[in-house]
Amino acid sequence: MSNSTNPFGYTIKAEDVIETLGFFDDWEDRYKYIIDLGKELPAMPEDLHTQERLIRGCQSKVWIDSSVENERLQFTMDSDAFIVKGLIAVVLAAYNNASAKDILDFNIDEYFQQLDLMQHLSPTRGNGLQAMVARIQDIARNAV
């Protein structure tokens, strides 16, 4: 998937998400921004919505597909919930188009802390977010 169809990891990176979320004073505006980010996810073809690609541990349905281009992992993800699509976008800003080593070295907990994210999610959403991260890290470990 090229950067012309997926801005995450290309034109929208983790630093951009941190910076932009910092502009908002309240969480209602932050949620709106996160949902808007989710609207920028490229569509995942329906035929990729399979059981093997489903991430276990998410309250909503979340699918993931990956490939390697020039030693960088490319992710296509989708969900049946708008806020979760936004959370996918936040995660892909950090992980998409990165090498397996960079994914494994990236301090995702610090990133979420800088976003002040986990305390503003329900426990089930937080668990789902951690399940997404774990799946991406497993993909990266297997790609090394």
Image (cartoon, helix red, strand yellow):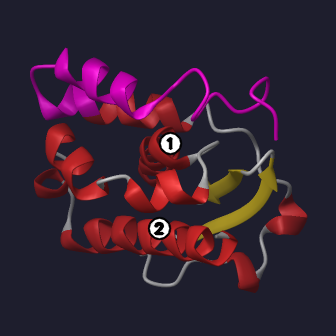
Residue 27 placement, left or right of 6: left
1 or 2: tag closer to the N-terminus: 1
Instruction: Indicate which disc residue 9 carries.
Output: none
Residue 104 horizontal/vertical position (percent): 44, 62
In front: 137, or 53?
137
Residue 57 placement, left or right of 110: right
Residue 95 horizontal/vertical position (percent): 52, 48
In front: 42, or 142?
142
Instruction: Indicate which disc residue 89 carries.
Output: 1
At x 18% / y 21%, what residue is drawn?
Answer: 22
Q: CA distance from mark 1 to mark 2?
A: 11 Å
Q: Quadrant of residue 6?
A: top right
Residue 26 placement, left or right of 81: left
Q: Amino acid at mark 2?
A: Met
Location of the N terminus by quadrant is top right
Residue 6 placement, left or right of 124: right
Residue located farthest toward the top when viewing the structure as drawn:
23
In magenta segment, residue 86: no
The local secondary structure at tag 1 comes to helix
Binning the other alpha carbons within 10 Å of mark 1 as few (below 14), some (14 to 19) or many (20 upward) gives many
In magenta segment, residue 10: yes
Q: Which residues are magenta?
A: 1-30
